[in-house]
Image (cartoon, rainbow, N blue to C red):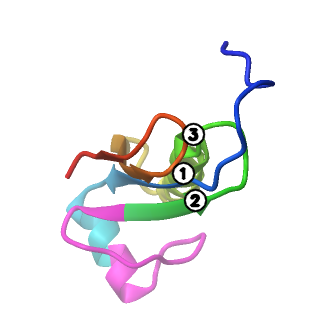
Amino acid sequence: MVGIRDKPETEPSANAKGRVLFSETILRLAKAGDLPKGDFLEEPSGVEITTCAKTESQTGVEMEALTAVSIAALTIADMIKAVEKSARIAELRSVEKQGGVSGDFLSE
């Protein structure tokens, strides 16, 4: 852990992405509105999740953005697990950060 007591407050923002990958069966059920726990927007073989987090803080904002993607991906995995237990959460990553003590970051 890094001590943050002496760090200046900044107003950083960060973006993160992740994907939930699943079978054609799930895609077909989602398009038909037949998933037992509800539906979500789909693309072929998966869902891409994008988040943006902003804060006024002494800590980095990347973890908040990654947490949001993780929770959304876990929610989708829970929605489809009754039909398919092999769905995968993949490509969870920070894609951009602006501001903060450590400066800007862009991965895409």
Tag shown at residue 100:
none
Between the residue at mark 1 and the residue at mark 3, the CA separation in whole angstroms equals 5 Å
Q: Residue at x 73, y 25 (%)?
A: 4
Q: Find numbered disc 3 in the image and state the secondary structure of the residue it sits on.
A: helix
Residue receiving disc 2: 53
Q: Can residue 34 be found in the magenta stretch? A: yes
- For label 2, count other residues whose C-alpha is less than 10 Å away and answer few (under 14), some (14-19) or many (20+): some
Residue at the far bottom: name it: 32
Residue receiving disc 3: 63
88 over 37 or under it: above or below: above
- Name the spot of residue 9 as percent of width and height, x first: 72, 44
Dots 1 and 3: beta carbons under 8 Å?
yes
How many marks are shown on the rendered structure?
3
Dots 1 and 2: beta carbons under 8 Å?
yes
Q: Quadrant of residue 86?
A: top left
For the question of whether residue 79 can be seen, the reply is no
Q: Residue at x 24, y 46 (%)?
A: 107
Q: Quadrant of residue 47?
A: bottom left
Task: Specify start and end residues of the magenta stretch as a single range.
Answer: 29-48
Q: Can residue 78 be found in the magenta stretch? A: no
Amino acid residing under circle 2: Ala
Nearest the eye: 26 or 9: 9
Dots 2 and 3: beta carbons under 8 Å?
no
Nearest the eye: 106 or 86: 106
Amino acid residing under circle 1: Ala
